[in-house]
Image (spheres, rainbow, N blue to C red):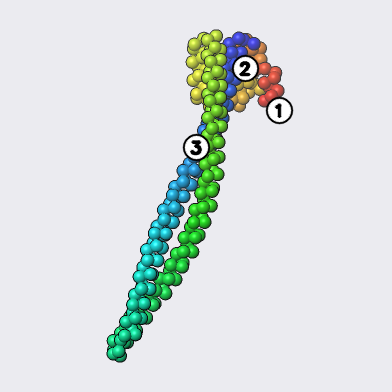
């Protein structure tokens, strides 16, 4: 096989390797970002629930103090009622006492409902805090593991890129420039095998004379449709046909 074709095939293998490493790196980084977003959303939700709980507790305390004051007013009204002698004044005091008792009973019931809500909110916050701690620990572990793996992938990408540079040195600059242009335009595939007389990049059937020449492996051919460099090997043909 023509050495230029062999080197182009090697360049493609190297770029495939780089693409695989970069895809792994992107997936790793994406997953880590996803976990961090989930954690941030949970933290915001937890903060909101804590704030609502604090407001409920504060309101509950205000209501409890108000209830105590109402109870004192009821007791004072009872004391005054005992001393009242006039019927009209007694009726007025009795009505006032009934109003105070009604308000006290309503406030007491409301305080009881609020206490139940506070208990439920406390339980929900506690459960969410436990879940948050669990996810946070997972993110920290993933962050640590990912940092090591990302460093490994960066190192691998750098090493493979150096190999690509060495291979590229043994090719004409114009060929390398054409290869890179096709690589960018054709989704990272610039060199493809020909199987049964067709370019495997775009499935276009080749003229019979070109197909014969490509099998000989002496000349450099580009597909007239997708511009990819083409080559033929028995192994590649068998692999594509499986």
Q: Residue 143 placed where, x, y %?
A: 52, 34
Q: Which residue is mark 1?
A: 242
Distance of label 1 from label 3 (alpha carbons): 39 Å
Q: Residue at x 56, y 24 (%)?
A: 152
Q: Is residue 86 above or below residue 43?
A: below
Q: Residue at x 30, y 89 (%)?
A: 85
Q: Earlier in the sequence, mark 1 or mark 2?
A: 2
Q: Residue at x 43, y 51 (%)?
A: 48
When asked about the image quadrant of residue 236, the answer is top right
Q: Residue 211 placed where, x, y %?
A: 64, 17
| Total labels drawn | 3
Check disc 2: other Cα within 10 Å, few if <14, some if 14-19, many if 20+. Answer: many
Distance of label 3 from label 2 (alpha carbons): 41 Å
Q: Which residue is mark 2?
A: 231
Residue toward you, 213 or 176: 176
Identify the mark at residue 192; answer none if there is no mark.
none
Identify the mark at residue 33; answer none if there is no mark.
3
Answer whether labels 1 and 2 touch (C-beta < 8 Å). no
Distance of label 1 from label 2 (alpha carbons): 18 Å
Q: Earlier in the sequence, mark 1 or mark 3?
A: 3
Check disc 3: other Cα within 10 Å, few if <14, some if 14-19, many if 20+. Answer: some
Let me know if residue 224 appears in the view: no
Instruction: Report the quarter where the N terminus lies.
Output: top right
Check disc 1: other Cα within 10 Å, few if <14, some if 14-19, many if 20+. Answer: few
Q: Is residue 44 above or below residue 182?
A: below
Q: Earlier in the sequence, mark 3 or mark 2?
A: 3
Indicate left or right for 79 with 133 as reference. left
Q: Residue 61 placed where, x, y %?
A: 39, 62
Which of label 3 and label 2 is nearer to you?
3
Residue toward you, 233 or 26: 26
Answer whether labels 3 and 2 touch (C-beta < 8 Å). no
């Amino acid at each position: 096989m023509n050495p230029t074709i062999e080197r182009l095939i090697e360049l493609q293998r190297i770029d495939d390797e780089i693409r695989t490493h970069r895809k792994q790196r992107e997936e790793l980084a994406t997953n880590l970002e996803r976990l961090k977003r989930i954690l941030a959303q949970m933290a915001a939700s937890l903060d909101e629930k804590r704030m609502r709980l604090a407001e409920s507790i504060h309101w509950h305390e205000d209501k409890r103090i108000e209830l105590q004051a109402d109870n004192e007013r009821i007791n004072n009204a009872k004391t005054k009622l005992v001393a009242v002698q006039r019927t009209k004044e007694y009726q007025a005091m009795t009505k006032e006492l009934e109003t105070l008792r009604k308000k006290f009973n309503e406030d007491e019931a409301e305080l009881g409902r609020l206490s139940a809500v506070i208990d439920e909110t406390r339980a929900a916050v506690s459960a969410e805090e436990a879940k948050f701690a669990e996810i946070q620990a997972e993110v920290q572990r993933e962050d640590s593991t990912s940092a090591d793996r990302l460093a490994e992938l960066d190192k691998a990408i750098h090493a493979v890129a150096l190999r690509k540079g060495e291979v590229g040195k043994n090719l004409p600059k114009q060929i390398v420039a054409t290869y890179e242009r096709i690589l960018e335009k054709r989704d990272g595939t610039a060199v493809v095998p020909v199987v049964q007389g067709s370019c495997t990049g775009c499935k276009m059937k080749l003229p019979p004379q070109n197909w014969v020449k490509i099998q000989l492996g002496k000349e450099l051919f580009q597909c007239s449709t997708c511009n990819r460099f083409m080559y033929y090997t028995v192994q590649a043909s068998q692999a594509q046909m499986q």
